[in-house]
């Protein structure tokens, strides 16, 4: 199976790209993922330590490593426990903070690989990202990596990243990824502040030889609360623009915490005459149903488990709890996988199974994880649920 690209719901790389599945509860992806049984992606925030200080950092990363980080032995135990999901195992995204700040990263990646667990890397673009380190991590089993670019110019990007020179370091890091042979995803933050620059950022993307551009629609958590989410109307226009771009772009385009892009894409594809099988085979189709807690699990640096990196509902800790039991049986995880429990417009929406809205944004805005996603302006038609299985 094609390995998911280092998506990351956390600090530097809010790509969080959620490669996906078909339908909702109990549905089966072509590769065999059944989301009631196992997540497709586990994001492991290996450390909070990071040399950057991004304004929107979910992790609110720090330059020092925290004393309560999972140790090497605890990390190995986590990987062991993830095999308890059975095949196909979830793919692990090593994220942070900056995972390159862990000296045992190569060991952990190799241990994942030895267990048959696929691995991706979401590093920060600092002087720690070198060709030698990336080559060692690739040799250990890293399959893809992601970097973040939030503006088309050094001034715009570095303003977000909090460290002058980060734009140039990221462009250099992209070159190193190519040199080492690691497929690269770029993540871009979507806020009121970056919206007008996205066309220029897209032009920059075309020069970087990437396999995927993932646009993360900001949710007000962590340092992100200092920035502004775009309006629902602008989000709808943006989704249509992205769909137009996807027709000719040399790389895949996806959204994170903007699941309603799927609704826009489905309607556009149906209008173009595509049948369900053809829609399902697209990169958008392969993402159907994936949302916080449905196909996704997040493990923080101290082992706390969340449905995603943007949904601050702690549901256990891998130091004392079995991640398989948490994912399968915790009531919050179970409710997030049940499209029938969704409320408001999302609950009435015919796209609830394939979309379901950003549960993290619903929670951030309303305090109710099952409420409607406020970034989506769609008025449900009252038609039966759209399903592709
Ligand atoms: S109303 Fe909810 S489920 Fe329907 S398209 Fe919008 S976000 Fe998705």
Image (cartoon, grey):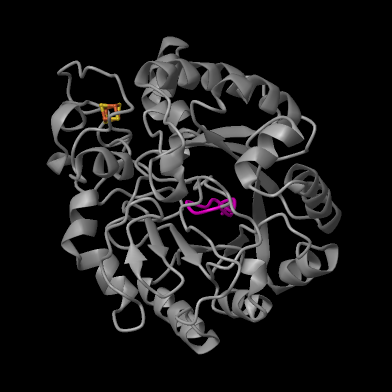
Split into 4 quadrants, where in the image is the N terminus? bottom right
Residue 128 against residue 272 in the figure, above or below: below
Residue 209, given in percent of the width and then of the height, sits at 77, 38
Pick the residue in front: 68 or 115. 68
202 or 282: nearer the eye?
Answer: 202
- Identify the residue shown where x is 30% and y is 62%: 37
Position of 219 with respect to 387 (left or right) is right
Q: In which quarter of the image is ligand 1?
A: top left
Q: Is residue 265 left or right of 387 when viewed as pictured? A: right
Q: Left or right of 360: which side holds 121?
A: right
Q: Give the range drawn in magenta.
A: 1-11
Query: Going by the image, does 272 lie left or right of 377?
Result: right
Identify which residue, 172 or 222, lies in the foreground. Answer: 222
Visible residue check, residue 283: no
Q: Does the magenta stretch include residue 6?
A: yes
Residue 70 visible in the picture: yes
The structure residue drawn at horizontal position 37% and vertical position 45%, both measured from the top left corner, is 290
Q: Is the magenta stretch mostly helix, strand or loop?
A: loop
Give how far across and how far down residue 378 sits, in percent: 28, 19
In the rendered structure, does residue 216 fall within the stretch colored magenta? Answer: no
The answer to which quarter of the image holds residue 319 is: bottom left
> Is 367 situated above or below 268?
below
Query: Which residue is outermost to the bottom?
Result: 73
Q: What is the x, y in percent for residue 83?
A: 43, 76
In the image, residue 347 lies at what x, y percent?
16, 33
Total label count? 0
């Amino acid at each position: 199976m094609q390995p998911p690209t280092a998506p990351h719901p956390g600090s530097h790389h809010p790509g969080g790209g959620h490669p996906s599945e078909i339908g909702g509860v109990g549905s089966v992806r072509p590769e065999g993922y059944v989301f009631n049984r196992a997540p497709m992606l586990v994001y492991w925030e290996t450390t909070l330590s990071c040399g950057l200080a991004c304004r929107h950092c979910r992790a609110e990363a720090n330059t020092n490593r925290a004393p309560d980080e999972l140790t090497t032995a605890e990390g190995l135990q986590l990987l062991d426990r993830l095999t308890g999901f059975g095949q196909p195992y979830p793919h692990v995204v090593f994220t942070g903070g900056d995972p390159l700040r862990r000296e045992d990263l190569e060991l952990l990646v190799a241990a994942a690989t030895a267990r048959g667990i696929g691995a991706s890397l979401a590093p920060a673009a600092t002087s720690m990202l070198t060709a030698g380190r990336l080559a060692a991590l690739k040799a250990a089993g890293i399959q893809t990596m992601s970097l973040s670019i939030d503006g088309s110019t050094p001034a715009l990007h570095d303003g977000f990243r909090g460290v002058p020179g980060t734009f140039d370091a990221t462009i250099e890091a992209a070159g190193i990824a190519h040199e080492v042979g690691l497929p690269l995803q770029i993540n871009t933050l979507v806020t009121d502040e970056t919206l007008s620059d996205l066309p220029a950022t897209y032009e920059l993307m075309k020069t970087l030889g990437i396999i995927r551009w993932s646009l993360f629609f900001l949710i007000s958590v962590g340092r992100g609360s200092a920035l502004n989410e775009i309006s629902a109307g602008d989000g709808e226009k943006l989704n249509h623009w992205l769909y137009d771009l996807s027709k000719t772009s040399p790389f895949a385009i996806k959204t994170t915490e903007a699941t309603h892009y799927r609704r826009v894409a489905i309607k556009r594809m149906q209008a173009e005459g595509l049948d369900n099988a053809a829609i399902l085979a697209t990169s958008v189709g392969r993402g159907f149903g994936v949302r916080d807690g449905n196909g996704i699990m997040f493990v923080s640096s101290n082992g706390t488990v969340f449905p995603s990196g943007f949904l601050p509902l702690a549901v256990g800790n891998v130091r004392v709890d079995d991640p398989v039991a948490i994912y399968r049986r915790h009531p919050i995880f179970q409710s997030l996988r049940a499209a029938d429990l969704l409320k408001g417009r999302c609950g009435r929406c015919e796209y609830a199974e394939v979309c379901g809205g950003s549960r993290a944004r619903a929670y951030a805005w309303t305090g109710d994880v099952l409420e409607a996603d406020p970034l989506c302006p769609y008025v449900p038609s009252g038609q039966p649920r759209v399903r592709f299985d």
